[in-house]
Amino acid sequence: MKILIKNGRVIDPANNIDAVLDVYINGALIEKIDRDIPEKKGDVHVIDASGAIVAPGLIDVHAHLREPGYEWKETIKTGTMAAVKGGFTTLVCMANTSPVNDNGSVTEAIVEKARSEGVCRVFPCGSITKGLKGEELSEIGEMFKAGIVAISDDGKSVKNAGLLRMAMEYVTIFHIPVISHCEDEDLSKGFVNEGRASLLSGLEGIPSIAEEIIAQRDMTIARYVNSHVHLTHISTRGSVDAINQEKRRYKQISCDTCPHYFTLTDEATLTFDTNTKVNPPLRSKEDVDAIKRGLKNGTIDIIATDHAPHDLTSKDVEYNLASSGISGLETAFSLSLALVREGVLSMKELLEKFTINPARMLKLPFGTLTPGKPADLIIFNPDTPWVVDTKEFASKGKNTPFQGMELTGKNLLTIVDGKIVYRDKGFGR
Ligand SMILES: [Zn+2]
């Protein structure tokens, strides 16, 4: 199929493009980007993108698809449907499934399922340790052959620093990063941010140092063994400062934060709404400001979703008993567009953090509209208002603290591999 997208504002940070242009897609590849590409009669599907932005498809380096093992929370099918609705064309799925993705056959099964049922690209992340138990290394070589793009014990950090060092040294053979969930196990037994929120609610707190000591430890080990560490869902001022310092002397460090860490403060947890329960916890205003500064000055390279869908019963309990996580794929990009309106980032800088930066981090050939590359792209309107309604979520996970919130900016159309996989009801018909 051939698709011609006319008159959109094309923004491709990787190629420093920001202009009103046409995009011509031939089969699975982008063939041409130019001014006024003529409409040839016949088999070309023409899309009018006037007034909208055409950008590379978004890449999420951190999502939980729950399959295999927790299909009542999410499946590869529903998770990828949520992804393309939210503007994502590629995502990395974490290893905390059942069975855990700690060997080649589980990786193969996920890759195969994603190929047959997924509507966007899915790359598995293998676990660092078998069963996420922190005791012995997973079958990393086997998983790499089967298609993993990173390893992580996400959900917790690897407590044994010697084992983590071994993993970091080992993955240098495969040139893949270790993704670190930075929370010290013994310091993070609480439920909300330690400070005002824990004081007022009486819920046990998680101090910011729980994150910061692990962030520093993991960067120090990576530097020592010359390996790439990616710190995921960074939430505190101390982490931003430490990463900023470490990046000055060691290059193979990258990091991401998630929309909830720059949109909400720990005030939100005072409602006892379990949809605000997430690990690491929502932090203070001071931390939120630091996260925004880190995004602006480039300390934070990537915005990820940490999409963590849950069934209702996992959340419909007391705060301390509720599962942690936010169903994020369908709100992440819209929430992040607020950073542009606030003047924290330019549109190009924001798109960098969703496209070319994650592609480079994972060494994937996506995240750009360069002719000859796979045709993964989105058309969105940064000004369209809409109200978050979980009844309309493609994800099975309705757990979001943003239910009922009015957001500005909406994905309208998603193309993966040259095929239209999502179209907003109101667009182009
Ligand atoms: Zn995590």
Image (cartoon, helix red, strand yellow):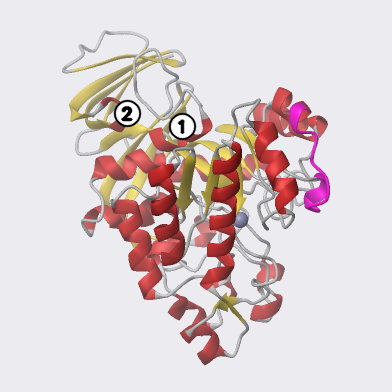
Instruction: Residue at 60% x, 33% y: name it.
Output: 122
Mark 2 neighbour density, 10 Å: few (under 14) some (14–19) many (20 or more): some
Instruction: Residue at 61% x, 32% y: name it.
Output: 149
Tell me where residue 352 sits by quadrant: top left
Labelled disc at residue 14: 2
- The quadrant where ligand 1 appears is bottom right
Q: Is mark 1 within 8 Å of ligand 1?
A: no
As shown in the figure, which amino acid type bears the numbered disc 1?
Answer: Ala
Tell me where residue 136 sits by quadrant: top right
Residue where numbered disc 1 is placed? 359
- Does 312 sit left or right of 384 as displayed? right
Q: Whole-percent x and y of residue 164?
A: 70, 47
Residue 1 is inside the magenta segment: no
Mark 1 neighbour density, 10 Å: few (under 14) some (14–19) many (20 or more): many
Do the residues bearing badges 2 and 1 touch, measured as CB atoms within 8 Å? yes
Q: Whole-percent x and y of residue 158?
A: 70, 53
Q: Which residues are magenta?
A: 130-141
Q: Whole-percent x and y of residue 307?
A: 56, 53
- Does 369 sit left or right of 116 as displayed? left
Q: Nearer the viewer, residue 408 or 169?
A: 169
As shown in the figure, which amino acid type bears the numbered disc 2?
Answer: Ala
- Does 259 sit left or right of 94 as displayed? left
